[in-house]
Amino acid sequence: MGIADTRRELAANRMIFEVRRDPALYSGFAENFETIMENYGLSEEERQAFRDIDIKRLGELGVHPYFLPQVSRLFHGGAYNHNNSPSAQAYGRSVVDGKGKTR
Amino acid sequence: MAELVFVTGLSHAPGMTGWLDRAPEHEQKSLTDGFNALGEKLRAAKPDLIIGLANDHVLNMPVDDPHDFCIGTAANWKGPAEWFRDWVNVDPYQLAGNSSVATALFDGLSAQGYDTIAKDELLFDDNWSVPLKYLTPDYDIPLVPIHMNCIVPPIPSPRTCYEFGQAVQKIVENDLPAGLRIAFMGTGGLSHDPGGPKYFDVDEEFDRWFLALLEEGDPEKVLRECTQEKMSAAGDGGTSELIAWIGAMGMVGARPSITICYEPAVELRCGMGCVYWEMEKEPANV
């Protein structure tokens, strides 16, 4: 998987693009993402990957790689994002270790 | 005829401002001293304005509608964009832009066929927030930001970026007001892989090879050897940001770069470094 495997038209890509730009969307994302996913028309596969915080799966579905650590930060926070931080660790378990689901 | 007084290439990974204390002490010192020294050199050149070239990070140009380049035309800028504020750990800042210079760049580059758009609203993340913190800590030098797409294929080739730099240099020389002193920074890299399997890795061998290649001051050799494939192999998700440095090389021609610092900063998840080019001397004929 890499940047060349991005699916440009994927609803999740449009959603993540907008979420990071809009305080009304990123504030409370971890609690509200079902509604946001509905509004952006994500497929059931995309939605399940978000419910599982399965970052690896999101990559396989065509989410742009640059968005993947950001998805982890939407759920786990972005402050002090060192290698042992919750968001970096969740990304690592899912993608680098290949475990997929982190919830 | 404006004057190009300073050109630099530097990394902008968010760990530099966000969690540098997690890096080994010798890396903290080397990078802090190096970036501060670069800032002193830039400010000593007394630029009236910085033209910057950096990854948009898919923050202003969406995945389904990217353009190679996006020139920021606003009279004023602010950052970091709110969602990125705690991540980069940079206090909110404001600085001036320069609408007339930005418009001259947009007109000139569009006329030459570059895939360029202009926006008067841009969100800034680590791309500018990290370099500005070190280069202009008082935010007192105006910035004309040029965001580029270097991570949603197809991305501009190293040669396109080099020629883009040459085109910017010609606009500076021919179309911008006499007496205006211009600095240029290309920012991104070095090896890193955000969103890929090498997320926690740095390719030190590639990084040192790239820095040594730039020090040779031979643009054609850089374009021949530093291919998209080679950058991708060193970290598919982000290493191609180095085309911003190749754009800077287009500004200076056949001049050797001078490396100020480099560290394979694993804790920052990025090869970190900075270089500059001396503008006092004429370029060599390579």
Image (tube, coloured by chain):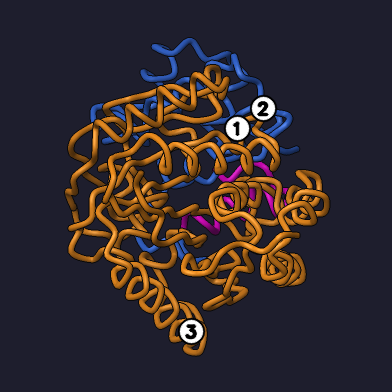
Chain colours: A blue, B orange
Is B110 situated above or below B6?
above
Image check: A92 left or right of B2?
right
Residue at 39%, 11% in the rendered image: A39
Say which chain tag 1 marks.
A
Residue A46 image position (x, y, % from top left): 58, 22
Q: CA distance from mark 1 to mark 2?
A: 5 Å
Residue B10 image position (x, y, % from top left): 50, 62
Q: Which residue is mark 1?
A: A64
Tag shown at residue A6: 2
Is B85 situated above or below B110?
below
Q: Secondary structure at mark 2?
A: loop
Q: Is residue B206 visible?
A: yes
Disc 2, disc 3: CB below 8 Å? no
Disc 1, disc 2: CB below 8 Å? yes
Residue at 18%, 35% in the rendered image: B75
Say which chain tag 3 marks.
B
Is B16 situated above or below B127?
below
Residue A102 lies within the magenta run: yes
Tag shown at residue B30: 3
Image check: A43 left or right of A73?
right
Identify which amino acid the numbered label 2 is placed on.
Thr
Residue at 25%, 43% in the rendered image: B82
Residue A44 image position (x, y, % from top left): 58, 15
Residue B243 lies within the magenta run: no
- The answer to which quarter of the image holds residue A24 is top left
The quadrant of the rendering that contains the C terminus of chain B is bottom right
Q: Secondary structure at mark 1?
A: loop
- The segment highlighted magenta reads A86-103
